[in-house]
Amino acid sequence: MVNTKLSNEQVERLMDEVLVVIQTIAPSKPLLKAFLTDLLTPAEYRDTALRWRIIKLLSQGVAQRDIAESLGVSLSKITRGSRELLDQNGGFAKVLKQSSSTKHKS
């Protein structure tokens, strides 16, 4: 029997490969969507979109309880997003800042 357990280092290398693929195909929205649809289960795809919606609502100052009620998600899922959003060096804050500055240039 072959050992299929991956080390953390192997997982990181594989994630780097995925990120390179995404970066390469990102200009083609249809190709990127097809890739993500194949890569993720329908539940993972939906959950990713939902998490991004939560982050955007939090960044607009919407209360966590209001988000939970309107989206039908647990407060713990929202709290995690809120905690990550507070990290100004984290990915969410950086992407939202870049996204905001891109909109202002248009």
Image (cartoon, rainbow, N blue to C red):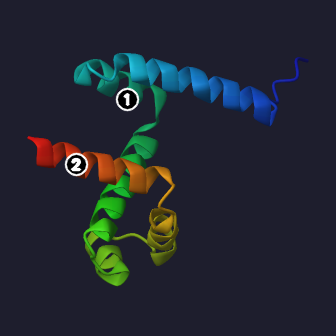
Label 1 to label 2, Cα distance in Å? 29 Å
Proximity of marks 1 and 2: CB atoms separated by less than 8 Å:
no
Q: Quadrant of residue 68?
A: bottom left
Judged from the image, the secondary structure of the residue bearing numbered disc 2 is helix
Q: Residue furthest left?
A: 106
Q: Position of residue 85 (x, y in %)?
A: 44, 64
User: Residue 105 location, x and y as percent?
Assistant: 12, 42
| Vertical placement of residue 62 versus 47, above or below | below
Residue occupying the point 13% across, 49% down:
104
Question: Which residue type carries mark 1?
Answer: Thr
Nearer to me, 21 or 38 = 21
Question: Which residue corresponds to the image point at 68% horizontal and 24% vertical from the top-left?
Answer: 13
Q: Which of marks 1 and 2 is in front?
A: 2
> Which element carries disc 1, helix, strand or loop?
helix
Is residue 80 positioned above or below 1 on the image?
below
**Residue 5 x/y as whole percent:** 82, 30
Give whichever of 78, 23 is nearer the camera. 23
Q: Mark 2 points at which residue?
A: 101
Query: Which residue is at 34% across, 63% downward?
Result: 54
What residue is at 49 percent from the left and 73 percent from the top?
79
Q: In which quarter of the image is residue 72?
A: bottom left
Residue 75 placement, left or right of 7 = left
Nearer-the-camera pick, 87 or 69: 87
| Neighbourhood count class around disc 2 (C-alpha, 10 Å): few under 14, some 14–19, many 20 upward | few
Image position of 54 with respect to 62: above or below: above
* Viewport quadrant of the N terminus: top right
Residue 56 in the image: state x and y as whole percent: 29, 60
Kind of residue sitting beneath label 2: Ser
Instruction: Name the residue tied to disc 1.
Output: 37
